[in-house]
Image (spheres, grey):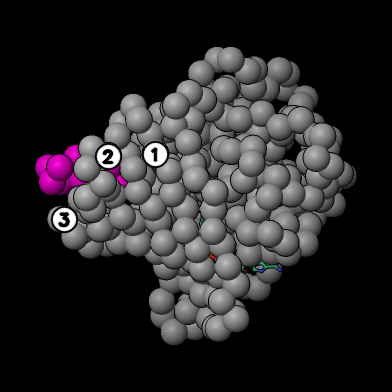
Amino acid sequence: MHIITEQQIAEVLDPEIAFFAVQDVFASMESAAWNFPVVRESLGHQDALYGFKSGFDPASGALGLKAGGYWPNNASNGIANHQSSIFLFDAESGQCSSLLAGNTITALRTAAAAAVSIDRLSITDPGTLGLLGTGHQSVFQLEAALRVRSFDEVMIWNRSGRELQKHLAMAEYYGVRCREGKLEEVVRESQVIITITSCFEPLFPSQWVNGGTHIAAMGTDTKGKQELDPALSLRAERFTDEIAQSRTIGEFQHLPDDAPIVTIGSVIEGTASGRSNDDQITVFDGTGVGLQDLACAQAVIKALGAS
Ligand code: NAD
């Protein structure tokens, strides 16, 4: 059995590998690949949420689970709030083949999902990227987005002032202007908005969002969490990674059950259309599925030659 550390993963898994692994598995989810029901529990200890995401992709043979969750008090102790580990199993025998540290994979696969949505759903020439939230995932989101569109400017908002050194350095590396903005200014001026917060209520009102905007809502991954005004989601064309998760633990849990939602996999496969005009608002609810983790874990194993 292989035991793979965060350091080994950071050496071989980059945003490009993650992008294609995630895009491919979203497509596979349109046919035989499926995610098993998510377990997500509030521990009543350290305010932590803990659970399991798992699935099987017969095409790639990816079988396994991610165990982990969110410990909101970690950051004040210098540890990322998100903590997870990934187990891969041999689909032929059920034997555990690999145990991988899950934090870098989580960050890269989540950012890759937003990037796939931006690539498929945003207008082709968005001038400004707005990023709401500057926690651990945020800079990964920034890099993944900058790789799929040529933005002129990045505007960043966080509810409490935070150091933006990593964001500024990342934007500079990609040759894009980057500055902090007030929430309303960021929302009104951006053609692509990524939300990556731990919020339990809408971050901004629907009317601040202009026609043509694409929103990748990435923070809502638990019952009760919410980043978007339901009026905005209802105004928009709605896309997600997995409809069952979106309606239970994702952003669209806050919508009526009959509100239509399209999978991003069907857009990738060409069985559903994505954006149909430059005035449409599109929302991608990235709930985070187990198969994203397994696909990236497999890519790591392949890159390390450890299979
Ligand atoms: P983090 O704890 O490092 O950062 C949290 C961010 O949310 C900070 O910017 C904080 O200021 C902001 N925030 C918290 N409460 C807020 C509020 N009420 N209003 C506005 N902003 C608020 O967390 P992280 O690791 O960066 O993760 C961010 C969110 O993304 C978490 O909710 C996490 O569960 C979620 N997440 C989702 C996926 C997925 O696949 N969808 C994957 C990883 C993380």
Q: Residue at x 35, y 48 (%)?
A: 64
Q: Quadrant of ligand 1?
A: bottom right
Cβ at disc 3 under 8 Å from ligand 1: no
| Spatial separation of the CA atoms under disc 3 and disc 1 | 19 Å
Locate residue 161 relative to residue 281 in the image: left or right: left
The magenta segment: 296-307
Confirm whether the magenta stretch covers residue 280: no
Q: Which residue occupies the foreground of this view, 178 or 234?
A: 234
Residue placed farthest to the front in the image?
A: 93
Residue receiving disc 3: 2
User: Looking at the picture, which amino acid does disc 3 mark?
Assistant: His
Residue at mark 2: 91
**Dominant SS type (magenta):** helix
Residue shown at the point (54%, 83%) measured from the top left: 46
Q: Is residue 301 magenta?
A: yes
Helix, strand or loop for disc 2 = loop
Amino acid of disc 2: Ala
Please give left or right for residue 145 compared with residue 121 in the image.
left
Q: Which mark is residue 56?
A: 1
- Above or below, 271 relative to 90: above
- Mark 3 or 1, closer to the camera: 1
Q: Name the residue located 54 percent from the left edge and 41 percent from the top edge.
A: 114
